Image (cartoon, rainbow, N blue to C red):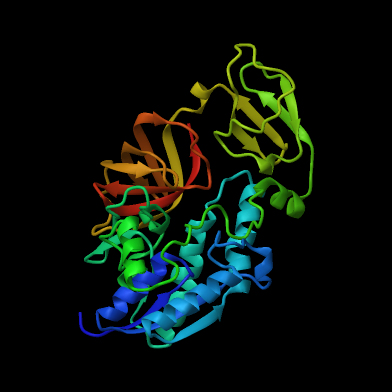
Amino acid sequence: MGTLRVLAAMSGGVDSAVAAARIAEAGHDVTGVHLALSANPQSYRTGARGCCTVEDSRDARRAADVIGIPFYIWDMAERFHRDVVEDFVSEYAAGRTPNPCLRCNEKIKFEAVLDRALALGFDAVATGHHARLADGVLHRSPDQGKDQSYVLGVLTRKQLSHAIFPLGDSTKAQVREEAARRGLTVADKPDSHDICFIADGDTRAFLADRLGSTEGPIVDALTGETVGTHPGAYGYTIGQRKGLHLDRPASDGKPRYVLSIEPVSNTVTVGPRTSLQVTSITCDNPLWNGPADPPATPFSCHVQLRAHGEVYPCQAQLSGDQLNIHLTTPATGVAPGQAAVLYTGDMVIGSATISSAS
């Protein structure tokens, strides 16, 4: 593919460091960039837990020095706050369950950063995601436990055509071994977990601070009775079982799960696990990024409904600007706001945002 000018996004973790090292070793003209995502980095996760802390920027710079590439920090705090943090809060306020990592990939790493990179004359952006590109089409990583094709499923064909995932054929264990061999100090750095902009990991408290506490009823779907109260419907997600604090047990003695969240009436409805099962899913904003556009008739494929979730065989059909999915076997805990990513084998063919399920 000749020598490319490549912008390597370096989070400060082991994956992006090895990705940058590989692309530089392949002979490309590589520049490292770390994204500063918080105007006050201390408010985000510390202790090697997130991907946007003060320690992370230092780790990224050290890795760039070892690799021998130029390194810059780009301030994306304002854009990140608007497109990821505010989106996260407003989605919860509307009774949906967002995926901020997916939104960050879409809006920050492959929209804002890629746009700026192309404007500056770079040919591509390289990241440490565990996913594989073949002829511009996204595929799963061979490391199923670390596969990130789901959170990249929202990328357009154009974005994928300017993306490089150097770790595409590697497992996480292989990446760590290589980092140690290359003398990268992040070889043993723990993986990031949870949501980077919620410093203590308490999502409910984070939302309460921004949306306030408004007490409302928790209603049993089977009896219609109010079985508890909550401080704000936004603090719950479809399929949740723990932390419901019901005033009395269900008549059948079985656990109760969140079945629906109604933000207008501030009502959380709970019921048995069997009531969570759905086979029909309606989605908005369909995007096709596989090798071909979808047929006009229903077609068979597989769908993943949450990050690291199960994969279900299904029939999918595009209907105007909606995607309708019928599952062969029922799924549970399907939450509006999450992405439905469609696969043929290990190849991503498209995605859409879940709006309802039954």
Q: Quadrant of the N terminus?
A: bottom left
What x and y, as percent, mark residue 124? 34, 78
Q: Residue at x 35, y 70 (%)?
A: 19
Asked if residue 40 lies left or right of residue 328, the reply is: right
Q: Quadrant of residue 215?
A: top right
Q: Nearer the viewer, residue 252 or 63?
A: 63
Choose top left, top right, bottom left or bottom right for residue 2. bottom left
- The one nearer the camera, 178 or 216, is 178
Q: Is residue 4 above or below residue 243?
A: below
Examine the rendering and report whether any part of residue 225 can be seen.
yes
- Which residue in the rendered view is the most extreme toward the top? 252
The residue lying toward the viewer, choosing from 70 and 289, is 70
- How many numbered badges does the structure rendering display? 0
Q: Nearer the viewer, residue 207 or 352?
A: 207
Position of residue 279 relative to residue 154, above or below, is: above
Task: Point out residue 228 in the picture as x, y percentages from the top left corner.
Answer: 74, 26
Q: Which x, y percent locates residue 321?
A: 42, 52
Tell me if residue 79 can be seen: no
Residue 304: percent from left, percent from top:
38, 44
Q: Residue at x 25, y 60 (%)?
A: 169
